[in-house]
Image (cartoon, grey):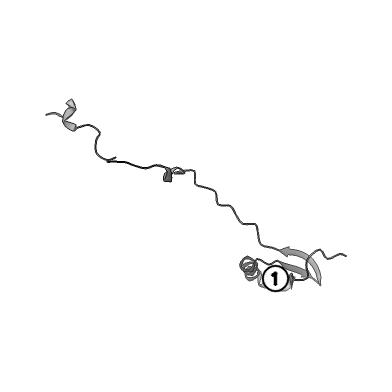
Amino acid sequence: MVNCYPEAVEQIAISKFKATCLAVIDQVNKTGESVQITKRGVPVATISPSAPVKKEKRKLGWMGDSITFIGDVISPVIDLDDIEAMRK
């Protein structure tokens, strides 16, 4: 059988992996190095770090940084005295 994994890959017995599964996954995530799981000395699986996840840009508010407000955007555009309904 040809070993297609580099010799530097850490090997761990399946019984030890079962007992320390979360710690092994945290180690792979932290170091970025793969860990090979063996059963009776034969490799059966490899835990390797996943590819970086590309963060998707928000759809709501995606143009938020492209608008510039000039002047007062709160007060009315025209004088309230010019509106007939506002006159007493």
5 lies left or right of 63: right
Q: How many marks do you count on the picture?
A: 1
79 lies left or right of 41: left
**Quarter residue 52 falls in:** bottom right
Assess disc 1: are there few (<14), some (14-19) or many (≥20) residues with their C-alpha within 10 Å of its C-alpha. some
14, 50: nearer the viewer: 50
**Quarter residue 64 falls in:** top left
- Residue at x 60% of width, y 54% of height: 53
> What residue is disc 1 on?
17
Position in image of residue 6 (x %, y %): 78, 67
Q: Seen from this angle, which residue lies furthest top? A: 84
Position in image of residue 54 (x %, y %): 58, 52
- Please, is residue 24 above or below residue 82 in the view? below
Quarter of the rendering occupied by the C terminus: top left
- Please, is residue 68 above or below residue 25 in the view? above
**Quarter residue 1 falls in:** bottom right
- Residue at x 22% of width, y 31% of height: 78
21, 55: nearer the viewer: 55
SS category of the residue bearing label 1: helix
Position in image of residue 56 (x %, y %): 54, 48
Q: Seen from this angle, which residue lies furthest left? A: 88
Position in image of residue 20 (x %, y %): 66, 72
Amino acid type, label 1 = Phe
- Residue at x 17% of width, y 25% of height: 84
34 lies left or right of 82: right
